Amino acid sequence: MAEEENKSTDLATVLETAPVVAVQEIGHLGRGLLFEIGDMFWFIVHTFTETMANVQSGRSPFRASSFFRHTERAGVGSVPLVAMVSFFLGLTMALLTGYQLQRFGTERLVPGLVAIAFTRELGPLLTGIMLAARIGAAFTAELGTMEVNEEVEAIEAMGISPLRFLVAPRLLALFSLMPCLSVISSLAAIIATSLICRAYFSIAFVYFNDLVIHALLMRDIITGIIKSFLFGLLIGAIACYRGLHVKGGAAGVGNSTTSSVVTAITVVIA
């Protein structure tokens, strides 16, 4: 009987302390998240200030060859993937919405619906997700390998700032090319929609063009471009930050790369 009473007392104690432990864990996670957001914010600020300081002093902030190499990888190399995925998603979206709107005789709304959706939201979103998976992972793995092999420390020993030499060209490449890729994504989806509208809903290309032009507003285009700039900045900052904070050798590089992709995609969707 005494043992059973002790067991029941221990169980009651555990049940009473469980909410407290849960709240403590949530607090620790929240505090860690806030610290990481703060670190990443100052990471971006220090990169920008060091780059601008070199520009104001008349020195090149980074090598032009490095910047153009990263723009070629992030921009030109991503065009086929972005265009193909957006094209097929545009086909699917036009078919699904067209069949539903056709029941009410309003299939002429399909061109404007797809054009606005991709220009404002889906174009920057899809481009951000694909760049986070393709380029963000590559940047994190590269910088993480350099950190593990102590190449970053060697650069610092030579009096060169890693933020200016390694981070700035990558960050600027993604920041400047995201809007271009978002435009390509939107155009590919609109072209796919025009084919579906012509084949299934008998909407001529000239009429389709008029419907898209009348549906799109300048604020839709500006909103999509602003989001593209923001997504490019966030993806580049997260990838470089994770890469320069790798710990634990080769396993740490893999964990940081996975964390970089997951974090970037989550932030872009959020």
Image (spheres, rainbow, N blue to C red):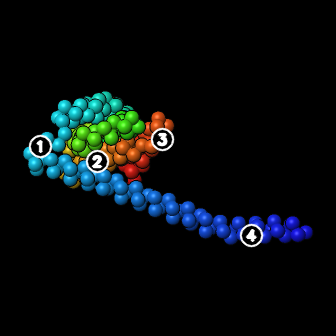
The image shows residue 18, relative to residue 148, as above or below, that is: below
Depth check, mark 2 against mark 1: the one in front is 1
The image shows residue 262, relative to residue 20, as above or below, that is: above
Residue type marked 2? Leu
- Examine the rendering and report whether any part of residue 196 can be seen: no
In three-dimensional space, the C-alpha distance between marks 2 and 3, rounded to whole angstroms, equals 27 Å
Comes first in the chain, label 3 or label 1: 1
Mark 4, other Cα within 10 Å: few <14 / some 14–19 / many ≥20: few
Residue type marked 3? Gly
Secondary structure found at label 4: helix
The residue positioned 76% from the left and 66% from the top of the image is 11
Secondary structure found at label 2: helix
Mark 3–mark 4 contact, CB under 8 Å? no
Residue type marked 1? Arg
In three-dimensional space, the C-alpha distance between marks 4 and 1, rounded to whole angstroms, equals 68 Å
Comes first in the chain, label 4 or label 1: 4
Depth check, mark 2 against mark 3: the one in front is 3
Comes first in the chain, label 2 or label 1: 1
Task: Estimate the x, y position of residue 36 in percent, counting from the top left.
Answer: 40, 55
The residue positioned 28% from the left and 48% from the top of the image is 233
**Would you identify the image quadrant in which residue 200 lies?**
top left
